[in-house]
Image (tube, grey):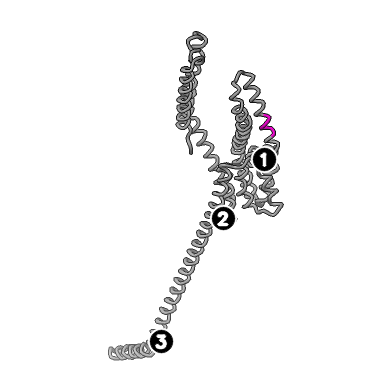
Amino acid sequence: MFGLSLAQILFVALVALTFAALAYVVFFESIAWQKKSDERLKSVKLAATDSLGKFTVRDKQAEAVKRRKSVLDTLKDIEQRQKLRDKNIKSPPLKMLIVQAGMKVPVARFYVYSVIAGVIVTILGLFLGSPLYLAPGLFLAGAFGLPRWLVYFRRSRRIKAFLHEFPNSIDVIVRALRSGLPLNDGIRLIAQEAQEPVRTEFRRMVDAQQVGISIPESSMRMSEYMPCPEASFFGIVIQIQSQAGGNLSEALGNLSRVLRDRKKMAAKVQALSMEAKASAYIIGALPFIVATLVYLTSPQYIMVLFQTDTGHVILGCAATWMAIGILIMKKMINFKF
């Protein structure tokens, strides 16, 4: 009953194939159109993604160029201001020298003290047997040389004390910033708790803020009262961060590390140059030691240099050559880094 002949099977297959061919012909255009639509949609999506990526890259590049230009403009402005400050640092007026030395003496009173020092030096020189014609020279040396040397000495000692404490103060500010405190509070903390002379310099920044001066401007002024590169570095970091943005705690942390490395390098240079310095001290002291020993053993032999005109000329030439030699040795053993 269910048996089919070969002719019937072929007929059924032919009918199925015919219907399949008719269905393919009918739906071919819709299938091809759907395929083209899918490809077109895919290409549009890829184009939109590429365009968005290009716009994103372009925006990032424009932002980077803008930020780089802002940083360069800031650096140029800071460089111009720093040149003006360097002129005052290299040859500051007397009033600024007294402030940098940490002295609270008015300029008029300083001149009075200078005159008193000149009179005292002149009297001591005449009392010790100095000729009368050397009195003006003694007065000038006592009035202008001795007081200013004292100011420069105290200024140098104050700068060394500042450099010793300054990296620790920057570390305190970094910890305050990382704990969430603003920069103002960190500066006030140093102005209250740090050691001198760092406390005085940061208190000066706090006082400047109270009269309306911004933190970047007051930090840039620190190098005027504390003439050292480290104070300039601190002001430059604050100035750049305020105009260009960035992580201030990281920048100050890097600055603290740089200052400590500079301090280590200075100690290393000093240790390496101690042998040369000791040799220079010995060579410079030998003529005076030999002259003293000769005077103790044979005073008449060496007194010819002090009692005759020829001896005076020889002593003058020897002193000149000794001064030249000492200056050359000083240049050789003083390393700049």
Q: Is residue 42 above or below residue 222?
A: below
Instruction: Specify few, some or many for label 3: CA neighbours under 10 Å numbering under 14, 14-19, or 20 or more.
Output: few
Would you say the residues marked 1 and 2 are in contact, meaning their CB atoms lie under 8 Å apart?
Answer: no
* Residue 1 % position (x, y): 35, 90
Q: Which mark is residue 194?
A: 1
| Residues at marks 3 and 1 touching, judged by CB atoms closer than 8 Å | no
Name the mark on residue 139.
Answer: none
Q: Could you tell me the amino acid type at mark 3?
A: Ser
User: Does the image show residue 138?
Assistant: yes
- How far apart are the two marked residues, 3 and 2, measured between alpha carbons? 58 Å
- The residues tagged by marks 1 and 2 sit, at their Cα atoms, a distance apart of 26 Å
> Which residue type carries mark 1?
Ala
Start-end of magenta stretch = 112-116
Q: Is residue 47 left or right of residue 93?
A: left
The secondary element bearing badge 3 is classed as helix
Q: Secondary structure at mark 2?
A: loop
Q: Nearer the viewer, mark 3 or mark 2?
A: 2
Lower position in the chain sequence, tag 3 or tag 1: 3
Mark 2 Cα shell of 10 Å, populated few (<14), some (14-19), many (≥20): few
Q: Main secondary structure of the magenta part?
A: helix
Residue positioned 28% across, 91% down in the render: 7
> For residue 115: magenta?
yes
